[in-house]
Image (cartoon, rainbow, N blue to C red):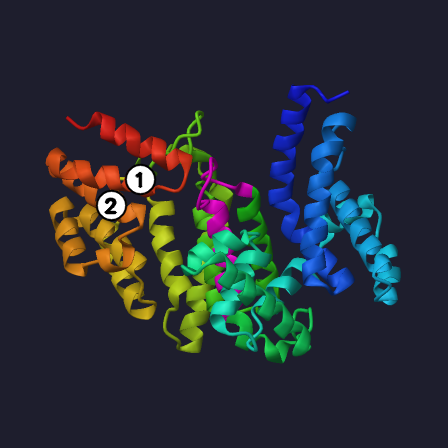
C-alpha cells in the first residue's frame, strides 16, 4: 500500500534538508573509507534514493543523517565486494562506527576532520586553479555537473570530462587524502580560505531555489574555519575570515520575514542580531589587526571585508552607519583584490554616503555592464538608485531585467514588490 501523501511530503522535505546539511560529511567519510571519489558520490545518491522510498513507508528515522551514512557505507561495501577489489578497504569500512557513534563523531570532531581533509585535497597545488575550483564546487558544495558547467560557461560534457580528469590526476599523482603537515599548509591556505568562504556564501545567500538562507551550511563553514584557525594560529587572514563569517551570520535570523521574504539590511530588526557572534567577531578582528601590526604586513582581502562587515554589524542604526569609511575600505579592497563585485559594492556605499546621484555616477564610470551584464544585483542597484532619484520611468526597465535574472524566489518576490510600487 502506498504511503499517505502527507507522509511522503514530510519525508521528502526532511530528506532534502538532511541531504543538504549532511552530504559533505557523508561523502568525505566515504572517500576516506573507500579511497574512491566516484564511488563515494554514487553511494551517497544511492542512500538518498533508498530514503525516498523507505522513509514514507517506515517513517523518518530518529537520526536521518546517521541512517544515510550507514546506508551509503553499506552500499560502498557491497560495491567493493562485487568488484572483488580493495578487500582491505572493505574490511576497514566494515569496522566503521555504528550510526550512533557516527552521530557522536559529528559532535566531537576535532582537527582530524574528514571534511577538512576533503577541502585540503581539493585545494592541492598539483591541480590547476580552475580545476580546484570546479572540483570543489562539485565535491564540497555538491553542485551538479550542469550547475558547475554553468559557473564556468562551458558545456556539461566539457565539465564532466574536466572533473573526471581531476579525479584521475588525484589518483595518478598519489595526492594524499589528508590535512597536510604544517610545513605544507601555507601553499594551500589561500585556496582553502577561498573554498571556506565559498561554502559560507552559499549558506548565507544561496544562489538559487526557494531558500535564500541555508543556516546549516553557514554553520558548517564557520566550524571548519575555526578548525583552520587552530591549524594556523596567528594568521591574520584566517582570523579575519572567521570574523567576517561571524559578523555576517549574526544577521541570519533577521534577513527574512515570517513569510520568507527578503528584508534589506537597513530595514532589519537589529535587536534580533546575534550579539554573541558580533562580540566574538569583533575580538577576532581585533586579534587579526594586532597580529598584522606585529608582522608589519598589509591588510588582505578578508581583513578588509571583515572591517566593512564590522561597520555594518556595530552601527546602532542604519542611518548612523559609517558609509564613508565603508566606501574607503571598498576602494582599498578593489586595489588588493580587484573585482567588479567589489566595485559594485563600492558604488552602493558611495550612494549611501554621498547620495544616489553620486553612486549612480560612479556606477556609470565603472562601466560594469561588460562584466556583470547578467548579474541581477547590478540591474537592481541601478534601478534602486534611479527610484531614489525620483526617476521611476528610468528605473522600470532595470527592475524588470533584475527580475528576469534573479536566481532565488525571495529575491524575485522582493523585486516584484518594488515593481508594483512604482508609479
Question: Where is residue 165 drawn, in percent x and y?
Answer: 59, 70
Image quadrant in which the N terminus is located:
top right
Look at the image and give the residue range highlighted in magenta.
Answer: 190-215
Q: Residue at x 19, y 60 (%)?
A: 366
399 displayed left or right of 157: left
Could you tell which of marks 2 and 1 lies nearer the N-terminus? 2
Mark 1 Cα within 10 Å, few/some/many (few <14, many 20+)?
A: few
Residue 410 placement: quadrant: top left
Mark carried by residue 379: 2
Q: Residues within 10 Å of mark 2 (few under 14, many from 20)?
A: many
Give the labeled residue for mark 1: 404
Residue 8, position in %: x, y?
67, 26
333 versus 363 height, above or below:
below
Q: Above or below — where is 154 with respect to 310? A: below
Q: Residue at x 40, y 57 (%)?
A: 306
Image location (x, y in percent) of residue 210: 47, 35
Examine the image and state in which quarter residue 273 appears. Answer: top left
Q: Of 170 and 280, which appears nearest the observer?
A: 170
Assign a secondary structure to mark 1: helix
Q: Nearer the viewer, residue 304 or 189?
A: 189
Is 196 a magenta residue? Answer: yes
In terms of depth relative to the viewer, which is nearer, 164 or 281? 164
Q: Which mark is residue 55?
A: none
Residue at left offset 83%, top offset 55%: 77
Amino acid at each position: 500500500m502506498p504511503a499517505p501523501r502527507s507522509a511522503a511530503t514530510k519525508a521528502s522535505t526532511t530528506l532534502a534538508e538532511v541531504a543538504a546539511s549532511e552530504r559533505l560529511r557523508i561523502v568525505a567519510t566515504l572517500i576516506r573509507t573507500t579511497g574512491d571519489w566516484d564511488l563515494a558520490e554514487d553511494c551517497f545518491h544511492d542512500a538518498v534514493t533508498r530514503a525516498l522510498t523507505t522513509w514514507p513507508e517506515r517513517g523518518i528515522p530518529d537520526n536521518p543523517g546517521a541512517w544515510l551514512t550507514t546506508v551509503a557505507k553499506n552500499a560502498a561495501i557491497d560495491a567493493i565486494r562485487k568488484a572483488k577489489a580493495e578487500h582491505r578497504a572493505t574490511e576497514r569500512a566494515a569496522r566503521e562506527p555504528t550510526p550512533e557513534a557516527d552521530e557522536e563523531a559529528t559532535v566531537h570532531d576535532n582537527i582530524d576532520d574528514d571534511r577538512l581533509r576533503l577541502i585540503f585535497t581539493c585545494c592541492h597545488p598539483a591541480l590547476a586553479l580552475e580545476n580546484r575550483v570546479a572540483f570543489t564546487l562539485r565535491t564540497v558544495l555538491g553542485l551538479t555537473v550542469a550547475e558547475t558547467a554553468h559557473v564556468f560557461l562551458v558545456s556539461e560534457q566539457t565539465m564532466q570530462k574536466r572533473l573526471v580528469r581531476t579525479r584521475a590526476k588525484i589518483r595518478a599523482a598519489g595526492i594524499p587524502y589528508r590535512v597536510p603537515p604544517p610545513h605544507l599548509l601555507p601553499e594551500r591556505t589561500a585556496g582553502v580560505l577561498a573554498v571556506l568562504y565559498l561554502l559560507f556564501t552559499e549558506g548565507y545567500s544561496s544562489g538559487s531555489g526557494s531558500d535564500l538562507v541555508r543556516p546549516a551550511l553557514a554553520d558548517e563553514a564557520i566550524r571548519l574555519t575555526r578548525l583552520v584557525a587552530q591549524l594556523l594560529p596567528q594568521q591574520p587572514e584566517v582570523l579575519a575570515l572567521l570574523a567576517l563569517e561571524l559578523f555576517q551570520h549574526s544577521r541570519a535570523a533577521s534577513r527574512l520575514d515570517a513569510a520568507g521574504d527578503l528584508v534589506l539590511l537597513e530595514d532589519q530588526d537589529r535587536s534580533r542580531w546575534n550579539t554573541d557572534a558580533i562580540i566574538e567577531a569583533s575580538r577576532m578582528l581585533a586579534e587579526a589587526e594586532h597580529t598584522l601590526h606585529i608582522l608589519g604586513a598589509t591588510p588582505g582581502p578578508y581583513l578588509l571585508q571583515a572591517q566593512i562587515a564590522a561597520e555594518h554589524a556595530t552601527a546602532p542604526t542604519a542611518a548612523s552607519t559609517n558609509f564613508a569609511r565603508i566606501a574607503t575600505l571598498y576602494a582599498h579592497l578593489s586595489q588588493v583584490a580587484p573585482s567588479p563585485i567589489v566595485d559594485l559594492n563600492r558604488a552602493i556605499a558611495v550612494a549611501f554616503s554621498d547620495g544616489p546621484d553620486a553612486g549612480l555616477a560612479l556606477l556609470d564610470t565603472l562601466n560594469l555592464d561588460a562584466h556583470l551584464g547578467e548579474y541581477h544585483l547590478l540591474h537592481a542597484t541601478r534601478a534602486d538608485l534611479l527610484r531614489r532619484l525620483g526617476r521611476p520611468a528610468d528605473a522600470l526597465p532595470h527592475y524588470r531585467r533584475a527580475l528576469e535574472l534573479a536566481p532565488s524566489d525571495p529575491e524575485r518576490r522582493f523585486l516584484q514588490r518594488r515593481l508594483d510600487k512604482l508609479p
